[in-house]
Amino acid sequence: MQQRKEVTGTIFDEMNVPVAGATITVKNSTRGCITDIDGKFSISVSVGDELLVNFLGYQTAIIKITSENNYNVVLKQKIDELDEVTVVAFAKQKKESVISSVTTVKPAELKVPVSNLTNALAGRMSGVIAYQTSGEPGNDDASFFIRGVTTFGYAASPLILIDNVELTTADLARLNVDDIASFSIMKDATATALYGARGANGVILVTTKEGKEGKAKVNVRVENSISAPVSTIDLADPITYMQLHNEAVRTRNPLGVLPYSQTKINNTINGVNQYAYPATDWYSEMFKDYAMNQRVTANISGGGTIARYYIAASYYKDNGVLNVDKQNNFNSNIDLRKYTIRSNINIDLTKTTEAIIRVNGAFDDYRGPIDGGDALYSKVMKTSPVLFPKSYPNVGEYANNTHIMFGNYGDGNYINPYADMVKGYKDYHRTSIVVQGELKQNLDFVTKGLEVRGLISTTRYVYSDVSRYYNPYYYALGAYDRVNDTYTLALLNPTGGTEYLNYNEGLKDITTTNYMELAANYNREFGGHGVSGMLVFTRRTQQNSNAGDLQKSLPYKNQGLSGRFTYSFDKRYFAEFNFGYNGSERFAENERYGFFPSFGVGYLISSEKFWKPLEKTVNKLKLKFTYGLVGNDQIGDANDRFYYLSNVNMDDSAKGQTFGTNWGNTINGITVNRYANEFITWEKAEKTNVGLELGLFNKLEIQADLFYEKRNSILMTRSYIPSTMGLTADVRANVGAASGKGIDLSVDYQHSINKDTWITGRANFTYATSKYERIEEPDYVGAGTPWRSQVGQNLSQRWGFIAERLFVDEADIANSPTQNFGNVVMAGDIKYKDIDGNGQITDADMVPIGYPTTPEITYGFGLSAGYKNWDLSVFFQGNARTTFWIDPSSISPFIDTDSESSLSQNALLQAIADDHWSESNRNIYAFWPRLSNELNENNTQISTWWMQDGSFMRLKSLEIGYSLPKSWVKKMRLGTVRLYLSGTNLLTFSKFKLWDPEMGGNGLGYPIQRVYNVGLNVNF
């Protein structure tokens, strides 16, 4: 027996700080000790013994005892598993072995000073096409698609999974970035085939953080933001409005009655009584310049060798920019408060069994205007600045009125946007609670590498809203005494107004979703051979408690069996096979289940021996190829359930019969709304992907993918069914086909210049285009108008007339093709090109114009750098190859465009005032045609005249931060303290200037916001 000796030593962490409480044990023995407050230990051992050093949150260190008597050891923190693996469908794979097209983004890159996560997606990840069309709190979700849109069904958005549970865009929008562990975009067939029925449009897979072994860590982040519109509509002043309104009448009919006398114009110019001669700036009356918003997030994580925890909460408060008068005893400005809680608990029941409980709750409390912010912005554009003021003061003979005296005109039917804003408010409450239980069992005792797990989840979603409002009293000017500067008012709706609140219950939505997942996973290496296999069974049921009709009230169900099998040799050659066998309730028994296989191969050339001389220059070179089939059962219409069953209205009053004495008896008839079709089946996507991964100088990494997709069996309504068949409903079949192709590219750069200075960069580029391959339509080629066919055109392509210019004069009109759109064509109206040459401008002259309305290109690029305690990051993002159309009806000045019972009189854009055709400015390429006092159908056709380039680039985010010196922080007993200033949507570069180009055709709505933010992040 070897003679024992006493050895000593000190245990340090990676910061060279002594570790107190570390456990030192002799391997294969019960003997041990614990380090003291200075990290020192002393223990009796023999030469050749091995000491195991353990401490929470650190890797086990081994000390081999030699003749030395003193040992110093530096413990290394446990490596985050996510740094070594990529999250894929239902599992994780080592990064080197992934051959699917999967893009991951660090959660830190999604931290922007907004409360909606979807607003941070554009340009951050290759493969994602994204844009935002509204900045209204609660209504500002971005639209996003993976590799564009290749279906013309109702569902084109990707499948969203958070911790493997299918959730909605709204749930993703409310996800707290601080809670995200990994964020992956799954794009090709091998990445999505396991989701079978729902993977055709791509998958967004998010996993949330779990606790790690170690001391409790607390993270708190507090932010305060100022948000203001990126751009606002520039309207003409009231004097110009009246002068051009008169011109609009005179230029069409020289004998027409002018709406404004010169006296009214002069008195308005001279500022005579603002209530008798109103000049209302509705934008300043309705909206503030900015709003203040707050965000607070906090989380705590830690645990021991048995249990680990991650607990988080957040509070967001977003305010609108509505300028609400304090005359009301309630505030109808937008006030959206979001609360989230999350608890992820991991417990090792045994050394081989782990239980996980995840609980997540998201709660929204909203108060705002009844019509919503978008509608109020639109109503401002429908209101004249000189017809009436927002309200009259309660003074003089009206001093005893207990209600607001809102302005109006005529019979009181005109839109008063201010009255609509303050007459009441809407409250809504949204609750989403997700509870998961997961059990993992390691079966190494059966065979090494085998594991089984089960997951059950329930999601409860509740939404309800209620509106409380009064009916405004409207007043109009009766008479004005110029001498005494007094006026009288006329009450326009004495029986229509109220001084009490009415109550109206709105939408109620109660949904319960239950999900079950069972999986078996095998992963093992034999020498240089690596094999893995996985089988997953899933079942999902969703029930709507207030669906509204019988079919939709029945539970929605689908289930499937999926599998993945992989093989690798010597970490150089990789092969993978996946399948999804999925069932959908929507199809008949013979079509109910679909089989969706995929395969892929990869070759890591840089692992070859002959690559050794090049590895310092090209440290990574990997080629990969995937091909497969993915399905989609979200076809037709969301309200369609069972295509193999008829949908019959047994009580149709429109088909009723009346009979009997004095025709006193009526029996309702029967109508077939949908015929049974047992042959309707899955929409199928055939996906091909060729990829390249390239690493240079151990600093630069490039990933590029070329992709092609053919979408078949798209459900369509048959274009022609003979009336002699006597059918009362449309006939549909899987006859449509479309394709998509493109490239997505990402470039990442990391470099540490010295111990104090570092720099990183990231760029993404996505090009995705699509086209119709087969579609139900008339035989346009046979009819001699092939340009009308959609085949070969992009799925979001628009058709319209080619506008050549404005008509020069009557002779020009007489010598041009006839344009019959309901108005007499005059000089200064739009002239269209006669494509078919028949002398008439008709629908047959409409051709594909512009780029698609969905951007074909989305890109982003940015840099981050740090020097000592300072850090700076900047990110640019843009869209290209996209077109939108101005709606000429909505901006046509002076006319009534309100589709409801109210009357409107459109405002005048400054752009129209500055650049319109007139007798004194006969510019045949002016922005606006000849003015009109009524809607001119000739000038409001979809055409190249209103076509706008939707491309833009913007400074999406900028942030500068300062971390307090560690010596200061240590005195405060904290871990890190960082102060930062940040902003979003700070600069925009675009050819289009009327409004924010990202909003496209929704430019008259609630504008996208520019945000300035100050924040504090504390860890301890």
Image (tube, helix red, strand yellow):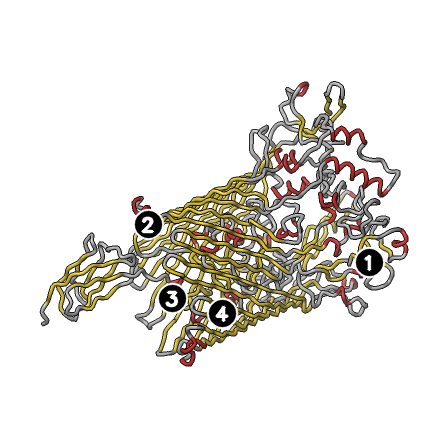
Q: Mark 4 falls on what kind of element?
A: loop
Circle 2 is placed at which residue position? 966
* Label 3 to label 4: alpha-carbon separation: 24 Å
Q: How busy is the neighbourhood of tag 4: few (under 14 within 10 Å), some, or many (20 plus)? A: many
Is residue 597 at all visible to an observer of this figure? no
Which numbered marker is on residue 452? 3
Q: Earlier in the sequence, mark 2 or mark 3?
A: 3
Q: How many marks?
A: 4
Q: Residue at x 56, y 65 (%)?
A: 200
Cβ–Cβ under 8 Å for marks 1 and 3: no
Q: Residue at x 58, y 45 (%)?
A: 136
Circle 4 is placed at which residue position? 100
Q: Earlier in the sequence, mark 2 or mark 1?
A: 1
* Label 4 to label 1: alpha-carbon separation: 49 Å
962 vs 197, left or right, is left
Circle 1 is placed at which residue position? 842
